[in-house]
Image (cartoon, helix red, strand yellow):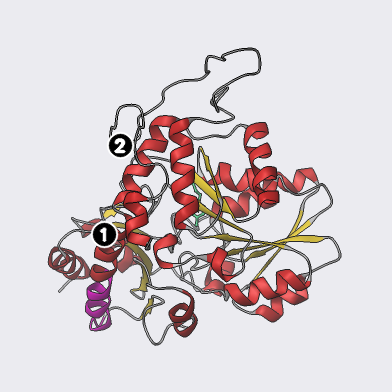
Amino acid sequence: MRSKTKMVHGGITRDEQTGAVSVPIYQVSTYKQDGVGNFRGYEYSRTGNPTRHALETVIAELENGTHGFAFGSGMAAITTVMMLLDAGDHVVLTDDVYGGSYRLMSKVLNRFDLHHTFVGTSNPEQVEAAIKENTKVLYVETPTNPLLKITDIKKMADIAKKHNLLLIVDNTFATPYWQQPLDMGADIVLHSATKYIGGHSDVVAGLVVVKSEELAERIHFLQNSVGAVLGPQDSWLLMRGIKTLALRMEAIESNTKELIQFLQGHEKVTTIYYPGIESHRGHHLAQEQMSGFGGMISFDVGSGHLAEEVLKKVKYFTLAESLGAVESLISLPAKMTHASIPADRRAELGITDGLIRVSVGIEDVRDLIEDLSQALGN
Ligand SMILES: *Cc1c(COP(=O)(O)O)cnc(C)c1O
């Protein structure tokens, strides 16, 4: 089955009992046992729920894995996966990972004696150099936020294999429609399903997929032990989102290409960050390991003042954090998502005050272009 078909026919797609073509929302916590310890597949909804199970099955298929797991948020998924580690272990991570992942490592898990080093994973030599005797996990995000840096997943898999590390890839920005890290050697792929997979700014959720029995068993044990599971209602919303994931990603990318052309021709735009353009540092790598470039663009308008003006004037771009929805969203990383990073470190990273980040939606792109054009002031 090809990816688009899997989104509609993959996993468990209907109710055997009634023939309903949508999986019912099993709003239930416990299940009647036929005899003591004799249950029909489900005993308690933290351990397993049929609606959640249907979602877990389809995401596993989309990522070409064997087992999927659904959590109450992307951070709940990441936290649970990090529980694979023991006190004293060390993790090497991409230096511009999602802010919440940075906070989890540096302000929470550090208190449990879990060590970490952030490196530019776009440079494999830096990754090699950061590996220590107690390193157990290599954690990569690609493309990253907000500069859309690309990391070579196959090279990371080689390094992980050589040093006996688990390779974990946060695939939130690319989605399984454009990038399949397990096929490139990753051990675990995870998502903030709050973003493209849900796709409608109406649910907070996280997903994890693995391709080995051993890891599946360990993660199911942790999912049940930690208990940060996704409820049946939200599981159903994600399955509904997945059915149109391909359509949305294609519409989003096509809009993004036209917006890029507009931005490239605009005198006030100094730099554009998008993996789909030739001048982007990770362009060729993105072309190799992704089948599409996605719908996130960052661009510099040269000053914080102009950037704030643009954000004030836009009508169709909603000023908000988050990304990946049907509606276009706009944000100012230096003042919003990345405000907690010191100004000099931000400058070093290229996150200037004039940098605007856009998550392109599925509106008519002519409206989006007209809107940005008036907001930029001509
Ligand atoms: C949003 C996000 C997360 C965290 O997910 P939540 O669902 O908000 O908890 C993790 N990684 C990336 C890349 C994200 O964009």
Nearest the viewer among 349 and 29 is 29
Q: Do the residues labelled 2 and 1 touch (CB within 8 Å)?
A: no
Q: In which quarter of the image is residue 256?
A: bottom left
Q: Is residue 67 left or right of residue 248?
A: right
Nearest the viewer among 223 and 42 is 42
Q: Is residue 67 left or right of residue 368?
A: right
> Which numbered disc covers residue 359?
none
Task: Where is residue 210? Give x, y as percent.
Answer: 60, 54
Nearest the viewer among 179 and 323 is 179
> Which numbered disc covers residue 22?
2
Nearer-N-terminus badge (2/1): 2
Task: Please tell me whether residue 368 belongs to the stretch shown in magenta.
Answer: no
Task: Where is residue 142? Give x, y as percent.
Answer: 52, 67
Query: Who's the residue at 86% across and 65% down the image?
Result: 133
Query: Who's the residue at 62% across and 73% down the image?
Result: 121
Amino acid type indicated by mark 1: Leu
The residue that disc 1 covers is 247
Amino acid type indicated by mark 2: Ser
Q: Give the range drawn in magenta.
A: 256-267
The crowding category of the residue bearing disc 2, from other C-alpha atoms within 10 Å (few below 14, some 14 to 19, many at least 20), is few
**What quarter of the picture does the N terminus occupy?**
bottom left
Q: Quadrant of residue 44?
A: top right
Q: Which element type, helix, strand or loop, lies under badge 1? A: helix
Q: Is residue 303 visible?
A: no
Task: Where is residue 101? Give x, y as percent.
Answer: 59, 52
Task: Where is residue 69? Give x, y as percent.
Answer: 55, 43
The crowding category of the residue bearing disc 1, from other C-alpha atoms within 10 Å (few below 14, some 14 to 19, many at least 20), is few
Which-is-in-front pick, marks 2 and 1?
2
**What quarter of the picture does the C terminus occupy?**
bottom left
